[in-house]
Amino acid sequence: MKKMVLTRERTKLLGKSNADFPSGEPGMYQLDITLKRGQNLAARDRGGTSDPYVKFKLGGKEVFRSKTIHKNLNPVWEEKASILIDNPRGDLYVKVFDYDFGLQDDFIGSAFLDLTSLELNRQTDVTLRLKDPHYPDHDLGSILLSVLLAPREEQREATMLMRKSWKRSSKTQSLRLSDLHRKSQLWRGIVSVTLIEGRELKAMDANGLSDPYVKFRLGHQKYKSKIVPKTLNPQWREQFDFHLYEERGGIIDITVWDKDVGKRDDFIGRCQVDLSTLSKEQTHKLELPLEEGEGWLVLLVTLTASAAVTISDLSVSSLEDQKEREEILKRYSLMSMFHNMKDVGFLQVKVIRAEALMAADVTGKSDPFCVVELNNDRLLTHTVYKNLNPEWNKIFTFNIKDIHSVLEVTVYDEDRDRSADFLGKVAIPLLSIQNGEQKAYVLKNKQLTGPTKGVIYLEIDVIFNAVKASLRTLMPKEQKYIEEENRLSKQLLLRNFIRTKRCVMVLINAAYYISSCFDWDSPPRSLAAFLLFLFVVWNFELYMIPLALLLLLAWNYFLIVSGKDNRQHDTVVEDMLEDEEEEDDRDDKDSEKKGFMNRLYAIQEVCVSVQNILDEVSSFGERIKNTFNWTVPFLSWLAIVALSLFTVILYFIPLRYIVLAWGINKFTKKLRSPYAIDNNELLDFLSRVPSDVQVVQYHELKQDPSHSPSKRKRNVPA
C-alpha cells in the first residue's frame, strides 16, 4: 500500500502506459475504489450530526452511491466499487450528502480525484478534502479512499472479438461467450457454513449485554445472521452456502456487531477463515477467537465439489445428448432417492431472444443482457449492443436445491459509466414449468405487478426427484443473500393491513355463523347444527381432526376437477400492488414531496416493524387458504399424504405413545445432534406455499398476439 504523491514524472509514466491501451475501446480500464471512511464531516442536522452518504461521478454520470451512516461525523463505510472506464484522463467527482428523510438531502461537500495522477497497477491511499464552491474557506472534513487503476486486457480482447464477429456476418447478433466470461461466473465448489454460537462476547450495552449478529463475506457474496437479543453467549444455529470460485481468494471475512436501534451498530470483533487450509468433503468444527474484541465464534465449515453448473451455446445441450440425458434421469430417479439429499433436481434454461424491448438510450436503442437467477445462483448472458430485438441463444444449467424455488430472468440495459437500467423481469415457479416448450413471457415491471415493454423467449426443462423434493419441503427455506431492505410505504402498510383484516374477518364471520346457530336465527340451520354437534361429540376421536382436513382438501379437488372451481382471482391484492407501484413512481419523480411520510419520521422503525408483522400474519393466513385451494398442486398432494399418514397413526396408536415419542425426540435431539439447526416442519411447509401477493407476482401475463413467432421480424444489428 502506498500513500498518494502527485508528481509530474508519474503522470508522464501513466501517459506512456496509456499508449499501449487504445482509448477508444469501451471499458479498457478498471478502477477499483474502496471507500474507507470520513473524518470530521460538517454537521447538517439540528442535533449537531449528519447522516452522510457518498456519490461517485464520472463524465457527469453517477457510477456509485454508498450506504447511509446515520448520526455520525466520522463514518466508516468500507465499501468497494469496480468501475470500467474508457481511459483514465478525466476526474472522479466525489460528492458527500446528508440524508434527510422525506426532504431534500443537504450538501456537505465535494472533491475531485485526478485519475492521471494515479500509477497503474498500484494500490494508492487517497485523502480528499471536501470543499463547497459557495464557502471555499469552510472546513467540511475529508474522505479516505483506496484506489487501484489497472488495464482490462480481457475486456479489450472480448471487444475485438465482438467487432470481428460483426464484420464477418451481418446476421450474427450475439457474441459467443468467451472462456473468461464463463470462468468469471461459474463456481467450482460449495462452501457450506453453519453458524453455531458465540461465547463470552464483549458487552456493548449499558445493561452489560449485547444484541449480537454476524456478517460473512466471501468475495462479492455476503450473508447476515439474525439478531439474538440481550446475550453474550448467543445461539444462532443458521446454515447457508457460498460459491467458491477458482479465480477468487478463499478467505471468509467475519465481523460481529451489536445491534443498536436509532444509532450506528457497535463493532464487537472480527475473524477470518482461510479455506485453502481446509480439506474438502469433510466437516470442520472451528472455534475462532475474535480479533479487536473479546469472545469466540463456533462454526461448522464443509467444502464440497459443485454439481454441474454450466453456460453454453444452443448447439451444446445436455438434455439433447441422449447419453447425458439418461445419466441425469438416472441421477434423479426413485432408485437414487436417498443419495445426496441436497441435490433435488436439474434445471436447464435456454435464453433464446427478446423482442420489442424498451429503448433505454438516447439513440432509441438498448444494449440488453440477461441475468438468470435461481435463489442465490446467478448467471449472465453477454450484451447485444444497440438492439431492441436481441438474440442470445445461450443455455444455462443449475442444480435445484428446492423445487419450490422461483426462476427469475431479468433484462437490463448495459451502461458503461453507471449501473445498468432495468428493462423487464419475469418470475417463474419451477413447479409451473412445462418441459421442452418454447414460450414467450411478457416482461413485467420491478414489482412484478404489471407488464412493461417487450417479451422474452425461453425454453425450460426441470427434472427432479419427487421424494427428495417432498423431504426438502419440510426443511428450512434457503434465504437470499441479497434482498431489498424493508422500507416504510404508506401504500404497503395499507395493503398489509387490508390483507390481515381479510384473514381476521374470516374468523369473525365464522364466529358470527356459530353464534347465529346458538340464537336460532334460522331454525332449520340451528337444528342441523345441534344434531351434528351431538353426533360429532359422541363419536369424536382424535384421528377425525386430520381426517376432516383431508376431506376438505378432497372436496376442493373434486370441485376443481369437475369444473366448479370457486377460487376467485384476487383483484383486490392486484389493485393494491398497482397502486403501490404508482406510489413508487411518484416517489422517484418527486423526492421533495412532503406528507404522510414526513409525519412518520420519528416512528419510522416502529412503523416498518408493524408493516412487516402485518405482512407475516396475513401471509400465514393466505398460505393456509392456498394450501386447501390447490394453488400449488404438488404441495396440496403432499398435504394429503401427510394428513392420511397422521389419520392412520392416530387411529391405530394411542395418543400417549405419540406424545411420548414426540417428547423423547425433543429432549434427546441436542444430545444426538449437538449442532442440529432448529426448525418447525409445519412452518417450513407453509413457507413454500405462495401468499396472495406472490400468486399475483408469479401469474403469467397473456402475450400480445403481435409477438407470435410467425410474425417475428428478423433484426439486422445496428
Image (tube, helix red, strand yellow):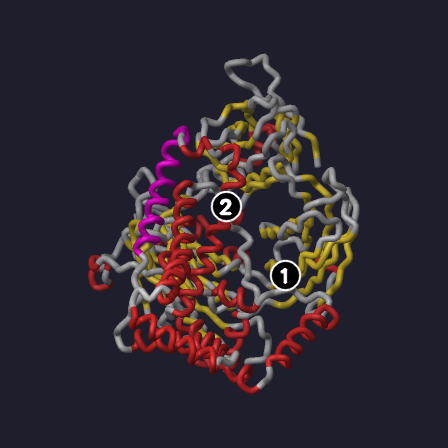
Q: Which residue is mark 1?
A: 239
Q: Amino acid at mark 1?
A: Gln
Label 1, secondary structure: give it.
Answer: strand
Q: Main secondary structure of the magenta part?
A: helix
Quarter-of-image position of residue 408: bottom left
Between 473 and 217, the residue placed more toward the observer is: 473
* Numbered range of the magenta stretch: 571-594
Q: Amino acid at mark 2?
A: Val
x and y percentages locating residue 332 in the rendered image = 51, 78
Position above or below: 4 against 712: above
Depth order, front residue of 586/713: 586
Q: Secondary structure at mark 2?
A: helix
Query: Which of the two discs, 1 and 2, sits closer to the camera?
Result: 2
**Residue under the point 50% across and 14% down:** 134
* Sequence-earlier tag: 1 or 2: 1
Q: Residue furthest bottom?
A: 652
Residue at the spot 34% in from the left edge and 75% down from the top edge: 528
